[in-house]
Image: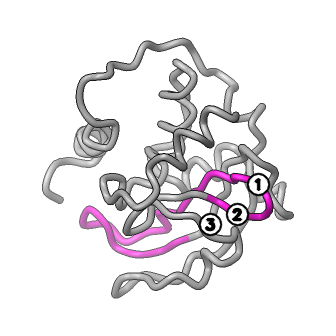
Amino acid sequence: MRRAVEWALAWRGEAGYATRCLAFVEDAYERANGIEMFGGDYAAESADLMHARLNPGRPPRGAFVFYDFVGTMLGEHRNWGHVALAVGGGRVVHAWDVVRVDGHLAVEDLATGPGWTRPSYIGWVPVTRLFEGARPKEWGTDGSAAAEALAAQERRFGAGR
């Protein structure tokens, strides 16, 4: 958990993960710990699969913190959701326009793009649940993690949508 939080905090101020919040929090655990995790294709799907709504209180350090977040992206209007990584003290690190640190409830007050609802906090998922089904993986050190996340998004949803 410590390595994941440190990895995520090192990205503060960087824009490479904009619109890829799930890839960002997954990469924090995967790349910092040499594993591959499995969840949904987007944050709202992962929140449902991991039952985030069962834990609506203040998230503990290391938890994935989920929000409902509805808008149009990649040509599709839906609840894409938003996800952050709890760093402790009620704060989260997350990919927004840039990677940033906010209070877990303050995320609900962030400015959104046209046609998007405000994020609405729904709950968190414990670290133990995040590691269910994970397997070892060696991540390359050549290239940017954010660029690899973009390529994965394009494979899942199509390029240029």
Residue 69 lies, in percent from the top left, at 52, 72
* Element class at badge 3: strand
Residue toward you, 120 or 147: 147
Q: Which residue is identified by label 2? A: 91
Q: Which residue is identified by label 3? A: 67
Query: Which corner quadrant of the image does residue 148 belong to?
Result: top left
Question: Of tags 2 and 3, which is closer to the observer?
Answer: 2
Using residue 32 as the reference point, say whether residue 13 is left or right of it. left
Badge 2 crowding class, 10 Å Cα cut-off, few under 14, some 14 to 19, many 20 or more, is: many
Using residue 58 as the reference point, say whether residue 114 is left or right of it. left
Segment colored magenta: 69-92
Query: Are circles 1 and 2 on residues that touch, CB within 8 Å?
Result: yes
Q: CA distance from mark 2 to mark 3?
A: 14 Å
Q: Residue at x 52, y 18 (%)?
A: 34
- Amino acid at dot 1: Gly
- Amino acid at dot 3: Tyr
Residue 78 falls within the magenta-colored stretch: yes
